[in-house]
Image (cartoon, rainbow, N blue to C red):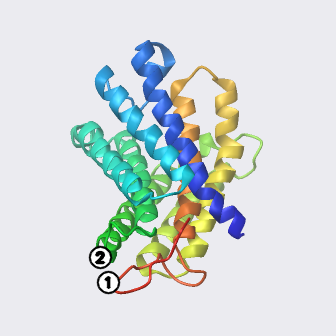
Amino acid sequence: MDSLIKSGRYIFAVSMIFFGSQHFLYAIAKRGPIASAPWVVGNVFWAWLVGSILILAGVSIAVGRKIVMPAAFLASTLLVYALVLYGPRLVANIHNPQPWTSVTELLAMSGAAFILSGSQRDSRFSASVTHRFIIAGRVLFGIQLAIWGIQHLMYANFVATLVPAWLPWRLFWGLFVGFAFIAADVSFVTSLLTRLAATLLGTLFFVIVATVHIQRVAAEPGSGSQWTSIFVAITMCGAGLMVAQACPSRGHIVSRAIGREPIQAA
């Protein structure tokens, strides 16, 4: 189990490198399926800049040395990206579930990166600072889980159409995932069985990748949106395991209060 949990940081890092590369491809091509992929800013300069941040942060996280700053910078970039690029779209289309999904995906990744940053040792940052990273991460990660859970229940019939036809009880599985998100959110908010909940969440996203997204990418290999969707799910798999690694074997996400010995998550 520990080996599985430790893989989360590397899965998350690879996904960030992919998204950064996707921005580079947009900046080079400026057309085609890559250009129409979600998350890619409609400006070449910003595509290069954001792509560089994602790749450098992904490499730093994978290497695993002095990653408090790059993880926090990545988290901040994703948060600003969500608010600036997708915030106005969400406000303009408040009843449209698509902007909600895009914003919460970025918030989830930002939250996971904040949690990773706050769970690391670095003499350049005080325990009070990294403790705030943990709090910010828990809030952001919890928000998206609640919204995803509610969306799965509100749009259960649509979610059921995404479940592979060879699986029985498609509506049941759509509802099951929604309740699983809500249960994980309750665990994070109440600090009950957080390590277990985060591990199960990462495992759930792995199953979703294997049963849903691989098939969809295989059917549309040239679709930038499908590649983005599968790597969002892969990122959330890594994020869940990464959050689990930031938890003691029994308890909630590590709290780095002033004067308390920090826990190394790497």
**Residue at the image point whose x is 72% and y is 40% from the top:** 165
Residue type highlighted by circle 1? Ile
Q: Earlier in the sequence, mark 2 or mark 1?
A: 2
**Residue at the image point whose x is 52% and y is 72% from the top:** 264
Q: Secondary structure at mark 2?
A: helix
Q: Decide: is 265 above or below 50.
A: below
The circle drawn on residue 249 is: none
Residue position for label 2: 128
Closest to the observer: 56 or 95? 56
Residue type highlighted by circle 2? Ser
Q: Is residue 248 left or right of residue 253?
A: right
Q: Is residue 229 left or right of residue 129?
A: right
Where, by quadrant of the figure, is residue 219 drawn?
top right
Closest to the observer: 260 or 213? 260
Q: Is residue 43 visible?
A: no
Closest to the observer: 151 or 215? 215
Count of numbered labels shown in the rendering: 2
Q: Secondary structure at mark 1?
A: loop
For the residues marked 2 and 1, what is the alpha-carbon distance in whole angstroms? 6 Å
Closest to the observer: 230 or 114? 114
Residue position for label 1: 258
Where residue 44 sits: x, y (%)?
A: 32, 20
Tell whether label 1 touches label 2 (CB within 8 Å).
Answer: yes
Q: Quadrant of the N terminus?
A: bottom right
Near mark 2 (Cα within 10 A), the count class, few <14, some 14-19 or many ≥20, is some
Q: Residue furthest front?
A: 123
Where, by quadrant of the figure, is residue 37 drawn?
top left
Near mark 1 (Cα within 10 A), the count class, few <14, some 14-19 or many ≥20, is few
Q: Is residue 69 visible?
A: yes
Q: Decide: is 106 above or below 257.
A: above
**Residue at the image point whose x is 44% and y is 24% from the top:** 24
